[in-house]
Image: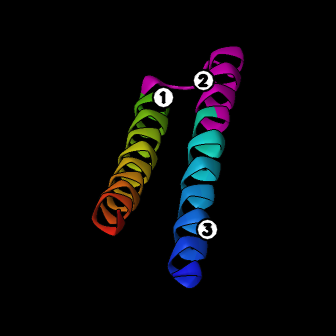
Amino acid sequence: MSNSTDQQKAQTRLASIVILVAMLGWMLVSFIGGKLGLPTRFAFLADFAAIGAFAWALIVLFKVWRQRQEGE
């Protein structure tokens, strides 16, 4: 049981790190893009990359939540 719990904790930690890095990267790309006057296609690329990271993290967290619900 502790192995399963450790794996869930690791997955939760990884998902939270992905959310943090995606948000900071998204804000950084938006800021730098605005300062340098980069084309809007780079802003959309950063948006889609962030959405992909957020979706992946949401799916991982949902799976962990479901595993915890089944374990109780």
Q: Distance between the residues labelled 3 and 1?
A: 31 Å
Q: Mark 3 points at which residue?
A: 10
Work out whether residue 20 or residue 72 is closer to the camera in this orientation and state it: 72
The residue drawn where x is 38% and y is 47% is 58
Secondary structure of residue under mark 2: helix
The residue drawn where x is 65% and y is 38% is 25
The x and y percentages for residue 8 are 52, 67
Secondary structure of residue under mark 1: helix
Q: How far apart are marks 2 and 3 (CA)?
A: 30 Å
Above/below status of 18 relative to 19: below
Looking at the rendered structure, the kind of residue marked 3 is: Ala
At label 2, counting other C-alpha atoms closer than 10 Å, the crowd grade (few under 14, some 14-19, many 20 or more) is some
Above/below status of 32 relative to 47: above
N-terminal of the two: label 3 or label 1? Answer: 3
**Among the 4 quarters of the image, the one containing residue 3:** bottom right
Work out whether residue 14 or residue 8 is closer to the camera in this orientation and state it: 8
Q: How far apart are marks 2 and 1 (CA)?
A: 6 Å
The x and y percentages for residue 43 are 48, 28
Above/below status of 68 relative to 24: below
